Amino acid sequence: MQVNQRTLNQSYTFSGKGLHTGVHVTMFITPAPENHGIKFKRVDLPGEPIVEAIADFVAPSARNTTLVKGEASVATPEHILAALYGLGIDNALISLDGPEVPILDGSSKLYAEAFSEGGYQDQDAKRVYFEVKEKIVVRDEESGTEVSVYPDDMFSAEVMIDFNSKVLGHQFARYDEKTDFKNEIAPCRTFVFFHELEPLFKNNLIKGGDLNNAIVIVENEVPQEELERLSNLFGERRLERGSAGYLNHLELQFDNECARHKLLDVLGDIALAGFYFKGKIIANKPGHKVNTKIAQLLRKAAKEFFSKPVVPKFDLNDEPLVDINGIKKLLPHRPPFLMVDRIIEMTPHHVVGVKTVGVNEGFFIGHFPEEPVMPGVLIIEAMAQVGGILVLSELDEPERYSTYFAKIDGVKFKKKVVPGDVLVIKLTLTAPLRRSIVCMKGEAFVGDTLVCEGEMVAQVIKNK
């Protein structure tokens, strides 16, 4: 089932400190047109540069995800990206007047609640899914992190964490298309171990951190003087170790809230692939470094897949859209120089035709008698005739016009075409018809194999 792209129904404003920089930032999130994707705009910088939310721009960072494009950077985008991805938002523009997305309460809760209340706009364009074809694995031996993506017919993600903690224990969380992201994943807060606080603070990694935006896990008894010292360091009134092992008697929203937050981070980082996909993620102790590497590999795999020619589907039992008699009404060619038997698909932008290469074709007599091969120039001619049908079918009186080659470029012959082959020929407009000139890309297939491709320019001329 095809799904339409969607955007937000209204604009939103969020303000707060960045977790790592401590800089107060105001962020505006606005609807965007179809095929826009998710983009950040640094409105505080000259020229208001745009940073696309894609893994191509991921830069090394210690405990978060950071995007850098030219002089513009956006730190800690993972929670807002998780909210958009988890709620199925394809297109949005996020404007910031500072270098880091506000941490807010350390989760995606405020975003998800606001977006759900404001609603969404379905757009005309269809969402493009990438189907994972091969297993992808990234490991980090130092941290013990491993994230894998497996082929599947739907999207899901499973997260396992085990930090040898008697407080956390071993935790598991799962997300799929039926999961209630707003209520089950979005509220889950970031977490940190008590013994990490001071080193992180001294290394300027949590300048904007406070106890309202993080779960602090305390493994062992901590002397009161140590708690007081850290209270002063963070500007908190008083720190206490709760009986359950969490600072200041904090109560978890879920027994596995920490694993769910790691799952939230996975979704936010995977969103940097730049598209939705079908595949199963299994993540063991996931972290931003490995998550974003997976997003990069997904982008690479998708680019390779989508750059391959799409073989038109063809069933000999289907009725043609235009049969041989209809073709003769559009084209002046006649056997033995009519190189298309039927048209099976046509839109204003592309056409698919079929040529059955029979053993009795006249050109096989001399090309080559002992090893008959269809001449490459005739494959090009077949492409031109199919393309001509596309162009002429858009005219009011097609029988009064003909198409003539003006230019052929980038032609590649990849495999021989022999008697018995069925050529499926696809022509796609690469530019609109202007001043009687049309530009097209042609592809010819036998089965699933691309046998010939090229670009051509033709001129439409009125018959004398």
Image (tube, rainbow, N blue to C red):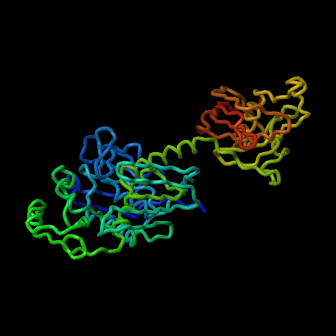
The residue that appears at 44% across and 58% down in the rendered structure is: 283
Task: Give the left or right position of residue 459, taking residue 228 as reference.
Answer: right
Q: In the image shown, does 306 or 94 lie closer to the viewer? A: 306
The residue that appears at 47% across and 60% down in the rendered structure is: 6
- Depicted 41 relative to depicted 459: above or below: below
The residue that appears at 19% across and 58% down in the rendered structure is: 197
| Picture coordinates of residue 224, whole percent (x, y) | 10, 69
| Picture coordinates of residue 74, whole percent (x, y) | 30, 48
Indicate the quadrant where residue 464 lies: top right
| Picture coordinates of residue 384, whole percent (x, y) | 73, 33
Q: In the image shown, does 143 or 377 lie closer to the viewer? A: 143
- Depicted 175 relative to depicted 270: above or below: below
- Depicted 40 relative to depicted 46: above or below: below
Residue 448 visible in the displayed image: yes
Q: In the image shown, does 93 or 188 lie closer to the viewer? A: 188
| Picture coordinates of residue 328, whole percent (x, y) | 83, 40
The residue that appears at 50% across and 43% down in the rendered structure is: 300
Indicate the quadrant where residue 310 lies: top right
Task: Give the left or right position of residue 417, taking residue 73 as reference.
Answer: right
Q: How many marks?
A: 0
